[in-house]
Amino acid sequence: MSVTISPSLLSCHFLEMGADIKRLDGINDLWLHLDIMDGHFVPNLTFGAPVLNQVKTITKHKLDAHFMVTNPEVYVEGFKDVGLHNFTFHWEAVTHHDRLIQHAKTIYPSVGISLNPSTPLSVIPEYILGKIDLVLLMSVNPGFGGQKFIPAVLDKVKELNEIKKKNNYKFEIQVDGGVTDQNAKDLISNGATNLVAGSYVFGAPNMDYATRINSLR
């Protein structure tokens, strides 16, 4: 099974975003990762629905939105027309998780949960894991690109994969933060099926993104 690579548009060349996205055409098993930040849950602001409405017109890759926001419930309806494949919210930002998952799954093909590096897997009841399509493990503290990978998250990936296999769950295990060719092999061997990479991909010499993506696989 091929591992999905999800280049994070947070690290693309913003004045050439359209061109950067087009450079990813023809690469298989690729999602476009979209970090939606509100300046409250994390100390940064990024793009919103108007930008994503343009993104969906120039790519056939699946759009993977990671909502680093205080009130993701509001965004479920607010982003329903921008062509998202996956809607991931932070466990730490929600009180009624089950209700939010049920609502989001009526709109989006895939719904995921994200955990900050210091949030243990034990906060998620196993019955919830049976309902979702993706678990995003942050391997940096969310809010900014270009940070260093936190090695302890590798054990978290392994633990989550053991839970997944024990219960025959089908969710993707996605890892986001500091992912490079130096840690991708270990992440994949421990169960990661989807790797988010921003600075590593979009920092490629001569904008050779395909070579960087292949090196992660």
Image: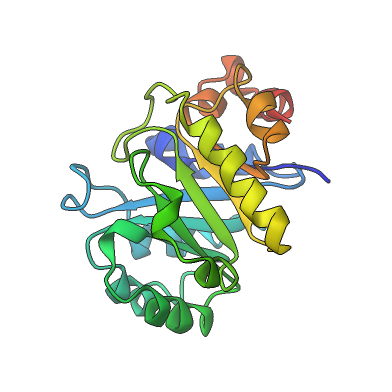
User: What x and y, as percent, mark residue 187?
Assistant: 63, 31
Residue with the most extreme right position = 1
Residue drawn at 64 percent across, 37 percent down: 23
Q: Depth check: 116 or 74 in front?
A: 116
Residue drawn at 54 percent across, 33 percent down: 155
User: What x and y, as percent, mark residue 115?
Assistant: 40, 50
Residue drawn at 74 percent across, 31 percent down: 217
Give the vertical position of 46 relative to 95 (above or below). Answer: above
Res. 36 in view? yes
Q: Quadrant of residue 51?
A: bottom left
**Left or right relative to 4: residue 95:** left
Res. 31 in view? no
Q: Quadrant of residue 61?
A: bottom right
Residue drawn at 27 percent across, 71 percent down: 95
Give the vertical position of 98 relative to 217 (above or below). Answer: below
User: What x and y, as percent, mark residue 198?
Assistant: 49, 33
Q: Depth check: 105 or 128 in front?
A: 128
Q: Quadrant of residue 75?
A: bottom left
Query: What is the number of callouts on the image?
Result: 0
User: What x and y, as percent, mark residue 24?
Assistant: 65, 40
**Left or right relative to 61: residue 177:** left
Q: How is the image coloured?
A: rainbow
**Left or right relative to 210: residue 200:** left
